[in-house]
Amino acid sequence: MTLSRQLVILVSLLVLLLFVGTFFISAYNTRDYLENQLASHAQDAATSLGLSATNHVAEDDKAMVSAMVNAMIHRGDYLSIRIEDLQGEIWIERQANLVSSEVPDWFQEMFPLEPPTGSATMMSGWRQVGTVRVVSHPGLAFQKLWDTSRETLSWFVVGALVVLLVGLMMLRLLLRPLKQVEWQAESICNREFPVVEQQPFTLEFRRVVEAMNRMSHKVSQMLEKSERLASRLREQAYQDPVTGLANRRQFMDVLSNRVEDVDAFYQGGVLLLQLNDFKQYNQEYGYPAGDQLLARVGDLLRQETTSLNKVTLAHLSGADFAVLIEDLDEAGVRAVAMQIADAVSSLFGELDFPSADIAHVGGVVYRGQAVSELMSDADLALRQAQQESANAWVVNVPNDAAVVVRSATEWRHLIEESVKTRSFRLLRQPVISTVDRSVLHQEVFLRLTNPRDEQEVLPAGVFMPVAEAAGLASEIDRAVMESVFEQVEADASGEVVAINMSPSSLVDNDMLEWVRRKIEKAANVANRVILEWPEYGATAHAQQLRQWIETLGPMGVRFSLDHFGKGFTSFAYLRELKPHFLKIDGSYLQSLEAEPNNQFFLQAVGEIARGLEMTVVAESVETENVWQQLEQLGIDGGRGYWLGRPV
């Protein structure tokens, strides 16, 4: 019960008690006054009748006395009139009925009136001839008491309503600061830190508001400090200080993680870039100029790959750079290599190079090689490029007969037919809690089946890049969501599922409304569904994702970001988006046991996320030792082959 309601009830009870006490005191005082009036009235009547009827009583004129008594009793002012002789015997007696038609019986019983008897001695000269006894009728007194009580009640009701109305207005005014404090506390819980500007005039409330403002500011500072500390740690541990690109260790961890995860990396390639005569350039122009050259090359790599969603850029050491390209076919990898080589060669005129031969690019297309083989093949391609000509590039493709080559039109027809006929499989992999080993939810993975060859099953990493390029990704998301919703409705276990969504769905103008209608029609689906986007898609379309969260969040739908930490984006956007789950990229688990920086980074992310009320999950948990490390670091859950394979 709210404080305002409790205060209203308390005030109402006090007013009611005040009225009851006042009412009864007033009623009893009025009753006493009326009883005194009845006694005076009866005594006056007895005295008057005694004086006027004495001679008739002395002469034994009973008829005349009876007429006088009857005249008095018929007026209705008297309950009884009685004349007694000297021996106390009743000589004449008349009585009226004790009735009052307008006064309720319960009121007469609650406030009974006992009319006193008025008496007078009848004297003829010095001789006593009898006694007159008169009892006034209480009907008029009851009527007066009833009317007075009703009038008192009416005034009380009017007064009470006025008091309550004024009291409610005053309470609303006085308790407005509490509403603001409540809003502020809710905002802090929702990872917002507002300050109440308007200070209440009530001293106690003003102190509460000031304390809440200080707390909001302090909590905001603590979170910002933790975010800055984690960002600095990430920069120092995983980022090259000169170029701002990933360092060698981070690049190798990402590459190892992608090679192990077929759903994350099925096609793409690795490019190596090496500046020519970089040592001589440092000696001739100085190390600051050398650092400027490295930074400029890093900027060019970013510019030439800005259109790619899944790319990892790294400065390995000295004159060596590396580029990991995901979700691109052979032609795409070659196009990127050519663009990078052309861009770097333009530095000849910009930085006054002594030679036009700036750098060479060598690469290899991924065909399932191990990490060491992949890097060795890329290095071989780099040596071949250096043997060809100035600023040359070479991209090799391993022989692999198992790879089916399709044109863009063939891919489009295959995807459209598979979606139309629902020729796909939905696999589920459990996300396990580190606290009690319970299943937090099941993450859904998509496999496409060739309708014309059911033996050909394609992971999402194979066809989704083609679907994105062809504008079919949102259609795949619709088909997957319809199937998952049907499964959830038919499943009475209450299991929660996470659906991996394409970034294209965020920019599809009709997609959000379509999902909202589907969820409204599907029973018990909203609170059992998690919609999940990769971090690069969320940061690229943060405004659209915020709209999804604001629209579907109140319905019970939860949201997740996966592959978190792959880019060097700020932590601040987490407070803006407010996802429910944060899934750390598996590359941070590659050397978790031996690398303290990885451990500290995961622990820092966990603390920040807990402050934002997010559940932190680590991807690619492949060993028991890694799982035990996650438990010690305070990570909430994990997903990986060691915990359970997709089935």
Image (tube, grey):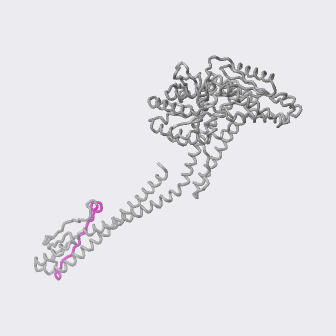
Residue 390: x, y in percent?
A: 81, 27
Q: Residue furthest right?
A: 284
Q: Residue at x 50, y 29 (%)?
A: 420
Looking at this view, is 547 or 69 the one in front?
547
In magenta stretch: residue 118: yes
Residue 464: x, y in percent?
A: 59, 29
> Quick check: 463 above or below 546?
above
* Rendered image quadrant of residue 285: top right
Residue 318 visible (yes or no): no
For the image, the number of numbered tags is 0
Looking at this view, is 337 or 310 the one in front?
337
In screen coordinates, is 61 left or right of 557? left
Looking at this view, is 82 or 488 the one in front?
488
Q: Residue furthest bottom?
A: 125
Residue 459 visible (yes or no): yes
Magenta-drawn segment: 107-127
Residue 575: x, y in percent?
A: 62, 41
Q: Residue at x 29, y 72 (%)?
A: 37
Residue 367: x, y in percent?
A: 66, 20
In screen coordinates, is 428 left or right of 107? right
In magenta stretch: residue 410: no
* Rendered image quadrant of residue 307: top right
